[in-house]
Amino acid sequence: MTAGARHLTARDLIDEVLDDGSFASWDSPVPVPYPGASPSYEDELLRARQRSGADESVLTGEGLIHGRRVAVIVSEFAFLAGSIGSAAAHRITAAIQRATRERLPLLAGPASGGTRMQEGTPAFLSMVDITGAVRAHRQAGLPYLVYLRHPTTGGVMASWGSLGHLTVAEPGALLGFLGPRVYEALYDRPFPPGVQTAENLFDKGLIDAVVAPEQLARIVDTALRVLLADATVGPPVPATASVPPGTGSAWESILVSRDRRRPDLRRLLAHGARDVLPLNGTGQGEKDPGLLLALARFGAQPCIVLGHQRPREPGDAVMGPASLREARRGMKLAEELGLPLLTVIDTAGADLSKEAEEGGLAGEIARSLYDLIGLASSSVSVLLGQGAGGGALALLPADSTIAAEHAWLSPLPPEGASAIVHRTVERAPEMAEAQGVKIAALVERGVVDHVVDERPDAAREGRAFCERMALAIEYELSRVRAMPSADRLVRRAGKYRAAAGDEPRQGCC
């Protein structure tokens, strides 16, 4: 925290985030004295109560955020540095279990030095019980949101502080596994500065955002509007549902798709979606600008969005292995929260570099395909523009695929295919046609189920094209979500088995 910054108390955070007057405590009185506590520990507890005004290091309960009922667990750092002993652990676990029983989303706001040293190993082991309760809450398909406050370290950071579907942090907060004072005592030197800060964790892809307390209610509300959206009423059938594929050549589409003015995923979300909440990185210390991951709604239809971020300038980063590890985070979120997955394909090819090879790009493409083919959630993929190579294939498998009229899909850019077959790039147009990369061929093979026309190409329409594509996405998200789930995986795999066969076929998956 910056010099002179004030620690938020638990009550401060509750008052800031919850609707006025809506908080109701779930806490039972803590036993006094603690069973087996030494006189010195009892004295510490008494002073902690007097200093903090709280009876333990956490407060739990429920309230409203923008009118929506939400469970909360908030640390009180002024009570023995927010440390977790047996009473606090029991309180946390009981609150998580109650939130699970009552089907409530849960917001956790830890600020803690970790487990309570005065209680030793039993307090340390309580992190396992708390983690088990969080796991059960998440497996029930309920949102678990975390707001990391200053400071959060030790066993709290290594358990319930690091398990959020969405994790944001207080500006300037000290966050890490090892407390810097412990490091200095053990190694007789200070911990390197700037490492254990909220801003650095964001840069490394470990948290999703750095958010001031006064912004937290808005962020939580946006997330829950997506995660808990009522999508039972389907949209009307859009005009694009009956659009035939274009009749132009494959090479015409390839040239059109390469126009730098063509709308990309950012513009599609800006003009066609709402409640867009970007997520950041893998949560495991990696992020890659080649991929965008977000929560969003298209009309009333919620989804997890993941897709290629087209480079803005030549030489900008393209999709590398970390992108696909981030994509697989999105796949897991979709499955756990029971949300449809939307993948958006728009790439001239994955990163071709020493770093990508050593980072396991081929393996990440394979694992992405593996996860998408077996995804428990419903899914829609969108061919938005270029679709070259394994980078495109890695995001393709879905229950339904939408394609822009001038999108395409190919094992390599046509110039590369021409160089392999004909020893020259000059025959790229011929190769593109022969390989069946254009949307008409993909419709014929049953890969593409819905075509969004371009009038005459998306680069000259901008917003209108994005709005038309968004209506198609809303319709397909609703349609695939309504499909029987029992045979979803068989139907999805069969679609690509048929597409790879000798005989082209007509019709949807």
Image (spheres, grey):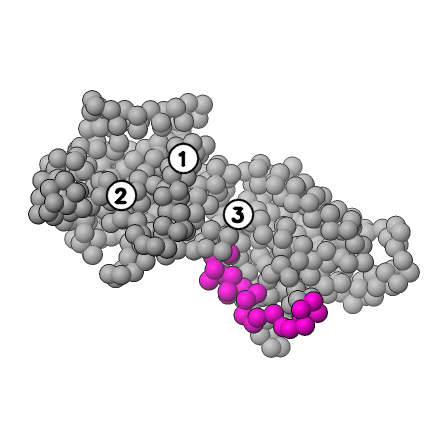
Label 2 crowd (10 A; few <14 / some 14-19 / many >=20): some
Q: Do residues under tags 2 and 3 come within 8 Å of each other at their CB atoms?
A: no
Q: Quadrant of the C terminus?
A: top left
Label 3 crowd (10 A; few <14 / some 14-19 / many >=20): many
Residue at 30% from the left image edge and 49% from the top image edge:
350
Q: Earlier in the sequence, mark 2 or mark 1?
A: 1
> Could you tell whether 372 is left or right of 208 in the image?
left
Residue 195 appears in the picture as rendered: yes
Which label sits on residue 370? 1
Please say if 482 is above or below 131: above
Q: Quadrant of the N terminus?
A: bottom right
Q: Secondary structure at mark 1?
A: helix
Which residue is outermost to the bottom?
3
Residue at 71% from the left image edge and 60% from the top image edge:
82
Residue 185 painted magenta: yes
Q: Position of residue 383 (x, y in %)?
A: 26, 42
Using the image as rendered, state which of residue 360 and residue 341 is in the foreground. Answer: 360
Please say if 408 is above or below 353: above
Q: Position of residue 298 (x, y in %)?
A: 36, 44
The residue at which mark 2 appears reads as 389
Segment colored magenta: 184-206
Which label sits on residue 165? 3
Using the image as rendered, state which of residue 5 and residue 417 is in the foreground. Answer: 417
Q: Position of residue 450 (x, y in %)?
A: 25, 34
Q: Do residues under tags 3 and 1 come within 8 Å of each other at their CB atoms?
A: no
The residue type indicated by label 2 comes to: Gly
Residue at 61% from the left image edge and 41% from the top image edge:
135
> Could you tell whether 29 is left or right of 482 in the image?
right
Q: Earlier in the sequence, mark 2 or mark 3?
A: 3
